Image (tube, rainbow, N blue to C red):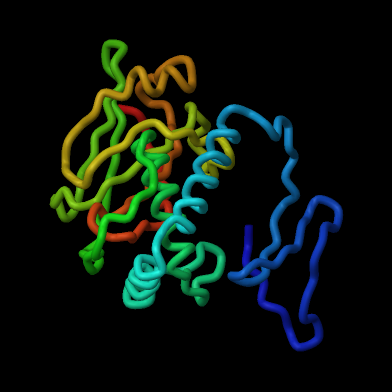
Amino acid sequence: MARIKFSGLVTEIRGSVGGTTFQRNAYGYTVKNKANMVNPNSLSQQTQQTTLFKCVNSWGQLTSAQRDEVDSWASANPQYSKNNPDSQLSGFAVWVRWWIFNITYRLNNYPSYVGVYDPVPAIAAMTFTLTSLAGVLTLGRVALPDDNVWAGGVFLSPSTSESKNFAGSSLRFINDFVSTTGTSDITSQYTNVFGAIPTPGQTILGKYGLLHENSLYATAYTSFKITVA
């Protein structure tokens, strides 16, 4: 998906042309390849739809004072649209985004109001490694700063060619973590999704996202590429 900035001669395009779709939302104009929906009602999509419904519905359950506090925090701690860095997210969008990430990473939390939110600290930079040894797949992580104030989720792909850099829709959620340096045994999580763990020398694509434990700040996803050790 790419963002569009129109010239003075063309001010708006909407709809689909061939395999390309032009669309507009609150954050600007975008163009993307038209999706080829193989199964629009899969279990994973049902889960995502349920999560979105919960998060949107929870905003309406807040009091006016609570929504005002979230709006004020979002204004003082700006976050921006993924596809339009000039468009600041509203309090509603910040609330929904943070809780979608939180439920995705932690699997069982329901959106709730927790009070005054902290300013955003330095964002942790995460580096990941994968080690496959004796049938065990270990995810290593290095966090800078190593401060335990960020939570996150890692998404990985099946083994792929070394020349490939774009994961497309192959990534699946594998493991949650906190911003500390350490390791996690992800053998069962990975095999439950992909059937078998990768072998040393194979290439895995991935991405991770972070959310602050004491505020409503969630980072954009950061992509990475790993050679299995």
Depth check: 37 or 107 in front? 107
Compared with 95, 34 (above or below) is above
On the image, the x and y values in percent for residue 6 come to 72, 79
Residue at image position (35%, 29%) is 228
Q: Quadrant of the N terminus?
A: bottom right
Depth check: 22 or 41 in front? 41
Residue at the outermost left position: 147
Depth check: 93 or 57 in front? 57
Q: Quadrant of the C terminus?
A: top left
Residue 138 in the figure: left or right of residue 191: left
Compared with 106, 64 (above or below) is below
On the image, the x and y values in percent for residue 226 come to 37, 37
Compared with 73, 63 (above or below) is above
Residue 194 in the figure: left or right of residue 123: right
On the image, the x and y values in percent for residue 130 come to 31, 30
Residue at image position (35%, 75%) is 72
Residue at image position (35%, 50%) is 112
Depth check: 51 or 115 in front? 115
